[in-house]
Amino acid sequence: MPPPSPDYDQLALDIKTWARELGFQRAGITDTELSDHETHLLNWLEKGFHGSMEYMARHGTRRSRPGELVPGTCRIVSVRMDYLPPGADPVSLLDHASAGYVSRYALGRDYHKVMRRRLQQLADRIQQQVGPFGCRAFVDSAPVLEKALAEKAGLGWIGKHSNLLSQDCGSWFFLGELYTDLPLPADRPASDHCGSCSRCIEACPTQAIVAPFQVDARRCISYLTIENRGTIPEEFRQAMGNRIYGCDDCQLVCPFNRFAEESGETDFSPRWGLDQPDLVALFGWTRQQFLDRMEGSPIRRIGYESWLRNIAVGLGNADTCDRVIAALTSRAEDPSPLVREHVSWALARHGRSVGQAPDST
């Protein structure tokens, strides 16, 4: 006789319990129907808001149709892991011109590896219970509409800034997915609670939130400092301030983030003083120091040149002093044309030109 079918209602409850035991703050389950989100994605792509992120369009409808990406998928387990680290107040850091601002998610170890390992452990627990089943884990590494899936799974709603929001914890969390062929009961989708609030739209330094729920990535500081590998358009450089990797402004002003709690995950704790780094010190890192110190960090993937490019802009926006001028001058003849161009702009911001020595003290 064939083995009895699992009690899927109980299994769903068990999965959520196991997820919490593995360090996920919450888990939810959804089906694969994403037609409304697919329409939103296609409209966003048609407007060119994805910029140079060609991978957003490369996979066709597999991003919005999970069954095309992983055949046999009928349910997705969506999980949340909080990442807000303890440390310096992010808002005050933005006013500290000599320090660099790194998006809070990137201060510690690469979340992709941390979460993917936990999701695999979750899959192993399920298999111990039901036997072999079809599954595949994703953490921001494949054509997956993770925020849409999380919203349908009841983990929160997509806010006007396009991040997922939860009433009880804000938005300082990562998302991951386990695609499965198990006919688990689906959770109820979350409802929108943004109301008439527009703080995120008003706070964006480069007006990248061009309308509620619409972000033009080409204007977004996170895109400009991370995804963009070329020149940062001059029109956005001053607005970048000291943001050298990503931007959290839309999250910092969100009222729901007053409920966010600091993460207990040691993997997400700040490394190398990145929670309040000195811009001049960072600009002095050699290529090998960058590679060594950013080992296991999401920052490493942007490469050394983009790192220096971003810091050069930050130094251009810093208070004028000999220390800043000397740091910029030291890279005025950098082998990279990309770095040289941004250093030249930064020096001009301080009323200097390439080759002009700093004032003596």
Image (spheres, rainbow, N blue to C red):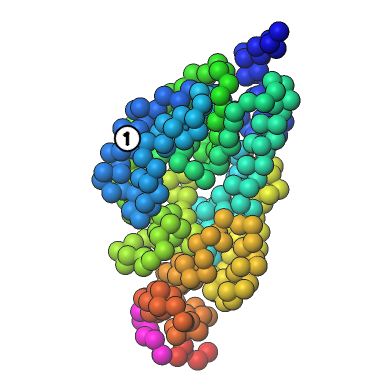
Q: Which residue is mark 1?
A: 40
Q: Which residues are magenta?
A: 348-355
Residue furthest to the top: 1
Quarter containing the N terminus: top right
Residue drawn at the location 49% of the way across and 43% of the way down: 142
Q: Amino acid at mark 1?
A: His
What x and y, as percent, mark residue 349? 36, 76
Res 197 seen here: no
Which sits in the foreground, 196 or 217? 217
Q: Helix, strand, or loop for circle 1?
A: helix
What x and y, as percent, mark residue 344? 38, 79
Which sits in the foreground, 118 or 98? 118
Residue drawn at the location 47% of the way across and 67% of the way down: 306
What x and y, as percent, mark residue 218? 33, 54
Residue furthest to the left: 47
Image side of residue 143 versus residue 116, left or right: left
- Magenta-drawn stretch, dominant element (helix, strand or loop): loop
Residue drawn at the location 30% of the way across and 42% of the way down: 44
Residue drawn at the location 43% of the way across and 57% of the way down: 227
Density class for disc 1 (Cα within 10 Å; few <14, some 14-19, many ≥20) is few
Examine the structure image and report whether residue 343 is included in the region drawn in magenta.
no
